[in-house]
Image (tube, rainbow, N blue to C red):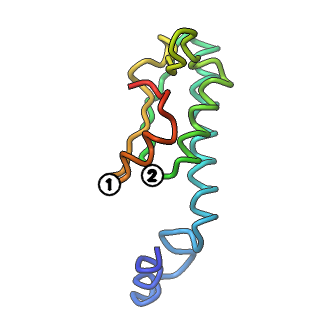
Amino acid sequence: MVTEAERWMTDGEQGHGPVWPTKEETDASFNYGIEKTVATIAQQVRETGHSKLSAVFATHNSISVGLGLDLLQKHGLARRNDENEKLVVSKEIAGSFAFTQLYGKLRFLRSRDDNASD
């Protein structure tokens, strides 16, 4: 993040810049994007029976992944399987919502939620 901010200033660009100044601001912005997207998809499913959007969230932040999984359940877009606790998404959003793991962070994220659906 510092490199991009420094390059922005060195190049004489005006305005806020391409990245948030702190990790906390970056995380808050990313998480807001997850919240807004899941809420929008849930509203579309309620109104039309399906989602008009597809979303892929790429992160290595386990808090953001956990937030997204919790929001899917809160909005009725996913539930935990009674037998094995795996997360099962609703048919209305199957194939249109994904979390991807940034390279090098696979083991860390899998250990965060061993119950996540494969």
Q: Residues within 10 Å of mark 1 (few under 14, many from 20)?
A: few
Instruction: Give me the residue at 59% from left, 21% from top.
Output: 44
Residue bearing the label numbered 2? 60
Q: Position of residue 33 (x, y in %)?
A: 58, 46
Q: Position of residue 101 (x, y in %)?
A: 38, 45
What amino acid type should be assigned to the residue bearing mark 1?
A: Gly
Examine the rendered structure and indicate whether residue 19 appears above or below residue 59: below
Q: Nearer the viewer, residue 13 or 95?
A: 95
Instruction: Give me the residue at 38% from left, 41% from top.
Output: 100
Q: Nearer the viewer, residue 108 or 38?
A: 108
Q: Nearer the viewer, residue 99 or 47?
A: 99
Q: Residues within 10 Å of mark 2 (few under 14, many from 20)?
A: some
* Image position of 72 (left or right of 60): right
Q: Secondary structure at mark 1?
A: loop
Residue bearing the label numbered 1? 104
Mark 2 and mark 1 residues within 8 Å of each other at the beta carbon: yes
Instruction: Give me the residue at 58% from left, 17% from top.
Output: 79
